[in-house]
């Protein structure tokens, strides 16, 4: 069964990649493109964004888009995503949410909406990154004693939230495997005389610069050895193809909150 897709933020970096990826996905049909009302692309063929006309006109009317689409893929900003979610909930449409930077209260709002509509919500849609999540769970259980955990991530200069949603999820996976609460053990910055590192903490380091798509490394640092599990993205295409896979996964589902571990059958 072919899933009919609407893409939010069509003129953005991920929006363009999603348009391109949809054209190469046989079980997905691109039917609606959304952008801000003040976007210069409103009223133009969305295919212009990737160099090939496709007949889908960029608009700002979410209700009109949902009349055509089964599912909305959203990689925008938290406030916009939540506004889109309320419309999806009202019209009983599915959503794939790749937006990051949500507060705990906003995540709870997504979970509440998922009681009525099907939602895939994941900080990273890449199949490779989600494989890394599984590896981190295994590694953390094996290296549970005598190893300090540090999470490093680097992204392009335009990213507005830090640490990245992927880095935070990596920390959550490790913390859960170790029986810890990330909110209590995370350290997000070190400066000056900090004293010795306490073993129960999980540290985060963030770099922003240039056009780095996304680099993530989790280090398990012991005495005399270090285990590193890394993922480096060369383009945004893995995120787009993963999101499309998530949209196909939601076909035929009435409600529920899922992530990419569910989509990939890694539970």
Image (cartoon, rainbow, N blue to C red):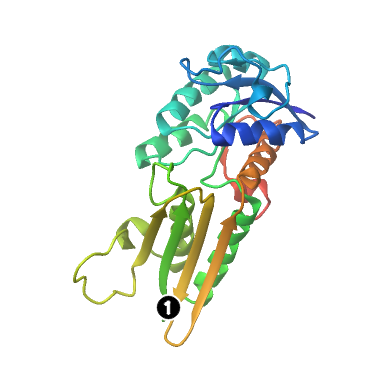
Q: Is residue 237 left or right of residue 171?
A: right
Q: Quadrant of residue 119?
A: top right
x then y, percent, for residue 230: 55, 64
* Residue at the (36%, 42%) spot, across then down: 104
* Residue at the (21%, 75%) spot, across then down: 195
User: Callout 1 environment at 10 Å: few (<14), some (14 to 19), or many (20+)?
Assistant: some
From where the camera sits, is residue 96 visible?
no
Q: Quadrant of residue 241?
A: top right
x then y, percent, for residue 117: 57, 28
The secondary element bearing badge 1 is classed as loop
- Placement of 223 over or under 232, stated as above or below: below
Quickly name the residue at label 1.
147
- Placement of 181 over or under 108, stated as above or below: below
Which residue is nearer to you in this view: 194 or 97?
A: 194
- Placement of 38 over or under 114, stated as above or below: above
Which residue is nearer to you in this view: 210 or 228?
A: 210
Q: Kindly give the residue lying farthest to the bottom in the view shown.
A: 224
Q: Quadrant of the N terminus?
A: top right
x then y, percent, for residue 232: 57, 58
* Residue at the (61%, 48%) spot, across then down: 235
From where the camera sits, is residue 213 visible?
yes
Q: Is residue 139 left or right of residue 209?
A: right
Q: Quadrant of the C terminus?
A: bottom right
Which residue is nearer to you in this view: 184 or 52?
A: 52
Q: Is residue 32 left or right of residue 9?
A: right
x then y, percent, for residue 113: 49, 29
């Amino acid at each position: 069964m072919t899933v009919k897709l609407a893409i939010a933020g069509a003129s953005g970096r991920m929006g363009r990649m999603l348009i391109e990826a949809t054209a190469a996905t046989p079980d997905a049909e691109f039917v609606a493109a959304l952008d801000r009302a003040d976007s210069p692309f409103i009223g133009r063929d969305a295919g212009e964004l990737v160099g090939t006309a496709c007949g889908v006109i960029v608009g700002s009317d979410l209700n009109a888009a949902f009349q055509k689409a089964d599912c909305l893929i959203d990689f925008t900003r938290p406030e916009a995503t939540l506004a889109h979610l309320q419309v999806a909930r009202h019209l009983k449409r599915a959503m794939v949410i790749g937006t990051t930077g949500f507060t705990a209260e906003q995540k709870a709002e997504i979970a509440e909406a998922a009681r009525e509509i099907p939602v895939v919500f994941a900080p990273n849609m890449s199949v490779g990154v989600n494989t890394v999540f599984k590896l981190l769970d295994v590694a953390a259980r094996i290296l549970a004693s005598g190893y300090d955990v540090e999470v490093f991530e680097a992204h392009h200069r335009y990213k507005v939230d830090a640490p990245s949603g992927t880095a935070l999820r990596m920390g959550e996976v490790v913390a859960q495997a170790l029986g810890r609460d990330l909110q209590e053990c995370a350290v997000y910055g070190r400066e000056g005389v900090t004293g010795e590192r306490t073993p129960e903490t999980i540290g985060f380091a963030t770099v922003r610069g240039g056009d780095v798509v996304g680099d993530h490394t989790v280090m398990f640092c012991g005495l005399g050895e270090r285990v590193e599990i890394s993922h480096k993205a060369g383009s945004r295409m893995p995120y787009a193809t993963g999101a499309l896979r998530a949209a196909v996964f939601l076909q035929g589902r009435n409600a529920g909150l899922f992530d990419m571990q569910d989509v990939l059958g890694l539970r």
